[in-house]
Structure formats: structure tokens, C-alpha cells
Image (tube, coloured by chain):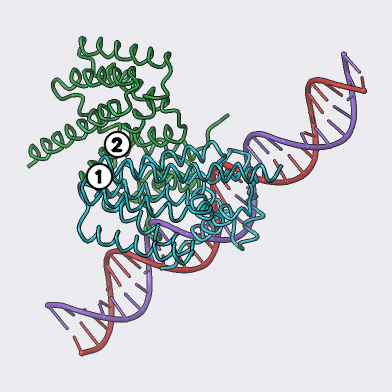
Chain colours: A green, B cyan, C red, D purple
Amino acid sequence: MEKRRADIIADALEERIFNGTYADGDRLDEVRLSEHFGVSRTPLREALQRLARSQLVELVPRRGAFVRQPGPVELMEMFEVMAEVEAVCGRLAAKRISDTALADLHDANHKCQIAVDAQEPDLYYAENERFHKIIYREAGNGFLETETCNLHRRLQPYRRQQLRLRGRMAQSLAEHKAILTALEQGDSEAAANALRGHVAIQGEKFHSLMATLKNAAE
Amino acid sequence: MEKRRADIIADALEERIFNGTYADGDRLDEVRLSEHFGVSRTPLREALQRLARSQLVELVPRRGAFVRQPGPVELMEMFEVMAEVEAVCGRLAAKRISDTALADLHDANHKCQIAVDAQEPDLYYAENERFHKIIYREAGNGFLETETCNLHRRLQPYRRQQLRLRGRMAQSLAEHKAILTALEQGDSEAAANALRGHVAIQGEKFHSLMATLKNAAE
DNA sequence: GGATGGGTCAATGTATACAAGAAGGTTGAC
DNA sequence: GTCAACCTTCTTGTATACATTGACCCATCC
């Protein structure tokens, strides 16, 4: 089945917003973009609405579409929510996780270890993602899984950056192991706390990263 | 500022879906609806996309828009998530809530007590909503507040039904008081647990209500 | 008689044309 | 000289026309 052009365009624009090609507040001109993509304004407008749905652009009536990059405050808020949501996933997963899923988590952690040893952030990131996705799924709540994945996706570019910090990969892996232990023991509270801390640290690391970048710019 | 027609139509359709005018699986014919609302297909399609964003309709490419009422399983999942999300709000609010907000909560509970005494579910519902909304806000996380309100809104019609069950209003108020006590004491865990239980019970009540209706229909 | 293939039809996806509103510039008056 | 109002222009919102595709039905072949 061929995808609709609106979806293709929305994906392309989303990529550009994440990439930083478009800065916060930039206006997305409908005619310019439609010419660029070689389509009419109709599918492009649909794409913009899809982006507005994800809060990536703001649609001001009669004014146009404006890129809306989350500011530092909103990002911290999102990280806090992500930490709490992951804690919820952990709480539920501790009671519901299957043995095969536990084996998968062990496997993901093993590959993460390899990534740490080889100092390969990209590999670590991929297996880290798998680790978390497994927990989302094993929470046994499809609605929760979908919403969590959506938020995870929105924070993805920021989550990725902080892996470059020295020693963060090894620390992250240690946290993964604690999470896995709690899940294996079926300890809901421990799993929730471990996951909350794991993600909250990411937010803090990101915050310090932001501060560093800001200071460097001044 | 005049609202865009797409928004007006989206609201109208949303209302109909909630009202049960449209059943699950109903196809929303673009031309028929556009004639009904006296607009062209363009704003109507935008309205459908806005509904698809809220998961109220499913947009199948080349097939059309179909009403997508959540089934019993998905509803239970949503109630479970609502319970956990409210618990998160309670956890954060316990540390951050202001004195004026605590006073507002007392006031809301007082009005709820009046509603219980007078056996007025509508009044109770209004003050109950205020009670919960205050907690969402006092969690001190704008992103969390927005997302929580969205989910709250989606569950609103189902939440409302179960207030009709005998004795539920009084029980609900007792739970409110426990929540308020935990918040006043700044006890995060107690607040989280109280709120989780409070909402989870709503899900269970709703479940039994569903079962009753289903049995009555057979 | 059943199944498969082609054709027709209807509905969605896309393009374009038109209307309405907002922003900015220019001109006139005080 | 400055402020305000009007006009122009550009952009968004809406309507309509066209294209494309999926579904259904009938006919023909096995």
C-alpha cells in the first residue's frame, strides 16, 4: 500500500524539526513547502495538522504554522513525566512480565555491555531502546504502551545527546541491571523506583548539557 | 476571533460520537457530512483528522473514516493508566501543593458533601472535577497537567455513569478526604496510593456496570 | 455451477481556483 | 515630523473540479 503524500511530508518535516533545520518560531510557508515537495497545498496542510497533533508546530488561525521547539522548562517537564510513566510501566511489568521477555531483557543488556566495552554509543542506543520498549510492552497495557512510545519518541533526540557524556553509558547499564533484578523479583516498587531514577537522571544530565551549551555560547 | 469551521465541525462530531449517535465502526461519509454541515469537503476532512488525532475515528487510507469507540478492554486499559497518572499527580502535588490550593480542595470537598447529602450527582460531578483538576495543576508540571486533562476528558462520559451506582458518591467523598489528608501531610506515597485506588475503583465500578448492561441486553 | 477476471462506479486523495483576512507600506493630515 | 488610515499584497481558509484507487457486479470460462 502506497503511503499518502501527507504522511511522507509530515515525516520529512518532523525529521527537519528534530534535526534543527527549522528553529523555534520559524514559520512554515505553505506555498514554499508545497513547491519544495512538488505537491499542492492540500496534502501539505494535512501534514501540518499532523505535526500540530504532535505539538511540533503551532497552528495559529489565519497566521500560519510555526515551529514549536520545546523550551528548557517544557523539556524538563517532559522528562519528569517520562520518568514517572516509565516507573508506571515498571510497576505493572514487575507483576506481568513473561519469562521470555526477561530473557530478552538479559540479551539486550548483554549487547549493551558489548557496546560499553567497545565505546559505541549508537549500538548502545539501539539496545537501550529495545530494553525500554520491552518493558513498555510487558506492562500489559496497550494504551499505556502506545502513549509511552509517543513520549519516548518525542524525547528521543534529547535522550540521545546525553549518551555522549563521559561515563554515562556505563552508569546507564548499571541502572539497567538494577531494573532487571527488580523485575525478576517481581518487586513493583523497586522496579518503579529504579526506572524513575534511571530516566530522571537522563533529564538531569540533559539539563546540565543544556547549561553547558548555553554557557559556551555566551 | 471566529473559530474555524473545521473546529466547529470537529466539536459537533465529537459530541455525537460521545452521545452514541454514531456507533462503533460507523463510516463517516465525507460528502454526506459536508452537505449536512453546509460546508465543502475540505474543512470536513480537517475535522476528521482532528478526531483521528484523539483516536475517536480511524482514518483508513482510501477507505474512509470510521468511528472507533473504545472497547471494554481498551477502556479498562485507559482507566488503569488514568489511575496511575493521577497517582503521579498526587505524588508530585504532595511535595508542591500550595496552601491556597489545599484550601480550595477543602472547599470542593465541602461542596461534595452537600451534593452527597442532597443526592445531587450533577453537583457532585462538578465539584469532583474541580477537586481532581486542582491536583493536576498543583503537580507543578504543565505538560503532565495537559496530558492528564486530555485523558480525563476522554474518560469523562464513562466516569460520569458510575456515579449513579448506589452509595458510590459517599464512598468517593471518603476517598477524597483520605487523599486530601495525605496531601496536607506531604506524604507522596500515601497520596499516590490513595489517588490510584480512587480512580481504579472507578474503573472497576465501570466494569461491573458494563457487565450489568451486557447481561441485561442478552 | 462456481470461480476468476474485467469493467464500471463510487469514494477518497490531490490540485487549483477563489475569497477573506491580516500585515505592511505609503500617503495624507494635523 | 509623526501618527493614523487606507490600500495593496500576500497568506490562509474554503470550494470545486479532477484523478486515482478500491470495491462490487456481471459475464465468461473452466
**Is residue C23 left or right of B9 when viewed as pictured?**
left
Q: Is residue A116 above or below residue A6?
A: above
Q: CA distance from mark 2 to mark 1?
A: 10 Å
Residue at 49 percent of width and 41 percent of height: B204
Q: Is residue B106 above or below residue A158?
A: below
Q: Residue A159 versus residue A85: which sits nearer the camera? A: A85
Please state which of the two labelled residues, at mark 2 or mark 1, is closer to the viewer.
1
Q: Residue A18 versus residue B57: which sits nearer the camera? A: B57
Q: Which quadrant would the N terminus of chain A be assigned to in this image? A: top right
Which chain does tag 2 point to?
A
Q: Which label was assigned to residue A213? A: none
Q: Residue B54 versus residue B201: which sits nearer the camera? A: B201
Callout 1 amino acid: Leu
Which chain does tag 1 point to?
B
Q: Position of residue B14 (x, y in %)?
A: 54, 54
**Is residue A16 left or right of B115 when viewed as pictured?**
left
Q: Position of residue B11 (x, y in %)?
A: 51, 58
**Is residue B112 left or right of A76 when viewed as pictured?**
right
Query: What kind of element bears circle 2?
Result: helix
Per the image, the residue denoted by label 2 is: A84
Q: Quadrant of residue A154?
A: top left
**Is residue C13 left or right of B202 when viewed as pictured?**
right
Is the residue under label 1 in contact with that under label 2 (CB below 8 Å)?
yes
Per the image, the residue denoted by label 1 is: B92
Callout 2 amino acid: Glu
Query: What kind of element bears circle 1?
Result: helix
Q: Residue A46 versus residue A155: which sits nearer the camera? A: A155
Q: Quadrant of residue B218?
A: top right
